[in-house]
Image (spheres, rainbow, N blue to C red):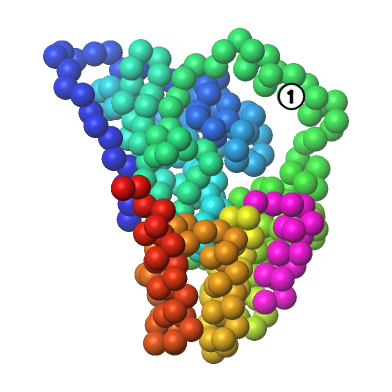
Amino acid sequence: MWVALVMVPCVAAAAATPVLSGLYSVGELGLVQFTLVDGKVVGKVKSSAQCTFPPDTQVVSGAFEGGVFVGSVTLCQTGAGCALQRSYPMLGVAHDDAVAGWIRLEGSCKSPALDGRSLFFRPATNEEKQKVASESSAAQVAGKDKSDPAVQADEAINEGQRLIQDTKFGPAREKFRQAMELDGTRWDAFLGYGLTEVKLGHPERSLEYFDKALAVAQLRKTSASNLAMAHYNRACAQVAMGDKKGAVASLKTAVRMGGASNLIDSLTDDPDLNPLRTDTDFRRLLAEAQAQHNRKKPK
């Protein structure tokens, strides 16, 4: 398991425990409201930036040990074989009323919420506070509450992702099914359902949902990296079905859309692709992807 890495400066004398309370800007994750609950710092999203968390989703949890924040942060992420959301351990250094931490994601996963590997907490500006207040008022006027199907679909998808992390694939599949019924425009609900079918030993059933995920994603003009993720997972299902030719074709599409550098680790190490390791077409694809990756490496 990857762990967060942080350089902790030496201090000459013990300092008061920092306080993390109120509205903060947490990198590109968004504006987060921090409170103290049972001695633990808890942060809930109030306004998302790069990640599409529903309002009041808990994304940060932890406590201070001296001047160091020890906890976890939930991030959205992209990349082949990567969960759409995942919680990572985090260590952060407190300085005045800000916290700076460094997080290393798993494998080739990337998160638009991070600046490289860093995540910086700083108090929200007055403008940001006004933005949250106005968005809250607008949501109330629009009646966007727990009864909104789109909000319920978000919650179901988030819960499905958490259950996948816990390898509870049956309950996760049910959550994605609920999300599909609540909001048929959520490509990630179809993708999650397909993934659980593969994990439950039904790869032939998953293809229908991966294809739906791709169709909806293209209609909604989602990012190329998300499309690459769907093609990659489709390839994993095809491998499980014994369709090596189809799997290599899907992987070629994933590399074309997502870029060799983003996929090279998964292509090299993913055990789901082991049945392809001796396949001539796959070995050729892997060699081409490695060459593309090497050309893009900084000299």
Closer-to-camera residue (146/128) = 128
The amino acid type, in three-letter code, at marker 1 is: Glu
Q: Who is closer to the viewer here, 112 or 64?
A: 112
Tell me which corner region of the image, top left, top right, bottom left or bottom right, holds residue 213. Answer: bottom right
Examine the image and state in which quarter residue 14 appears.
Answer: top left
Question: Which segment is the magenta one?
Answer: 207-223
| Residue under the point 55% across and 46% down | 76
Q: Is residue 23 visible?
A: yes
Measured as percent of width and height from the top left, residue 83 is found at 53, 57
Q: Is residue 72 above or below residue 264?
A: above
Q: Is residue 184 above or below residue 110?
A: below
Q: Main secondary structure of the magenta part?
A: helix
Specify whether residue 221 is painted magenta: yes
Q: In the image as oriented, which residue stretches furthest toward the top?
A: 126
Image coordinates for residue 95, horizontal then vertical, percent? 33, 17
- As drawn, 298 above or below 8: below
Q: Is residue 21 left or right of residue 186?
A: left
Label 1, on which residue?
Answer: 135
Say which residue appears at 61% left-offset and 10% top-offset. Answer: 126
Residue 192 is at least partly visible in this image: no
272 is higher (above) or lower (below) than 266: below
Question: Which residue is depicted at the point 54% across and 79% down?
Answer: 248
Q: Quadrant of the N terminus?
A: bottom left
Residue 222 lies in the magenta-colored region: yes
